[in-house]
Image: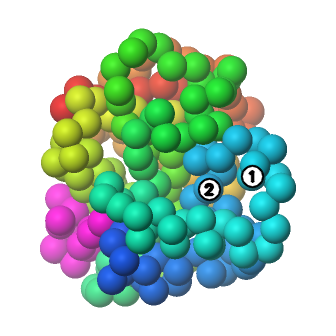
Amino acid sequence: MNGKLGTLIRVEPATPERWSDAAILFESDGPRGCWCQYWRQSSSGYGAGGPGSGERRLRAQVDGGPPAPGLIAYDENVPAGWLGLGPRGSMERLVRSRTIPGIDEVPVWSIVCFKVRVGHRRKGVARALLDAAIDYAASQGAPALEAYPVDAEGDRLDVAFSYVGFASMFEAAGFERIVETAARSAGRPRILMRLAL
């Protein structure tokens, strides 16, 4: 898969042969880092995980695909970014969420996070990941793709709060605003957005 914003950014599913590239993207978080597990487990399950549990779980998810639990962006063949996604029904914390409730019975896929490495930001990596996620979810038979980005209202936000993406980027990719959720990032509303595939 190639991102639509440039020929130097290539996006591929996180498959077993790309595990070392996925690990590069998360290793700076250390053994207690998220490793794209926050939404995939219950609150208690996530909290009970010891050092290294996130890495082990992500490795098992990568090895157990398809579908892949995420996509990897390469900037000139260097691992530069990650997008976590999958069927909403497989995201245990999201299924139980009171702040981001499901709106209907459509078996949507959810985009739950972006991670772009320092040195690769502001180069179109997140948008390339989003474009590839649309194609990947469609290729896996998803009827629709959902996301829960923050509405930054034109302001710049710290990367710690923008891991969910920005509503404006999703709108530019054709997603529609469905409802403002009770979830917040940096005090800003997060919007449930959806794209029919």
Check disc 2 and give the amino acid type.
Gln
Image marks 2 and 1: residues in contact by CB distance under 8 Å: yes
Please indicate whether residue 137 sits to the left or right of residue 89 in the image. left
Please indicate whether residue 77 sits to the left or right of residue 27 in the image. left
Please indicate whether residue 158 sits to the left or right of residue 50 in the image. left
| Above or below, comparing residue 38 to residue 188 in the picture | below
Instruction: Name the residue at 22% across, 62% down.
Output: 3
Instruction: Name the residue at 30% across, 66% down.
Output: 13
Residue under circle 2?
A: 37
- x and y, in percent, of residue 49 in the image: 78, 61
Does dot 2 land on a helix, a strand or a loop? Answer: loop
Quadrant where the C terminus is found in the figure = top left
Q: Quadrant of residue 127?
A: bottom left
- x and y, in percent, of residue 175 in the image: 31, 30
Tally the numbered discs: 2
Q: Nearest the camera: 35 or 179? A: 35
Q: How is the image coloured?
A: rainbow
Residue under circle 1?
A: 46
The disc placed on residue 192 is: none
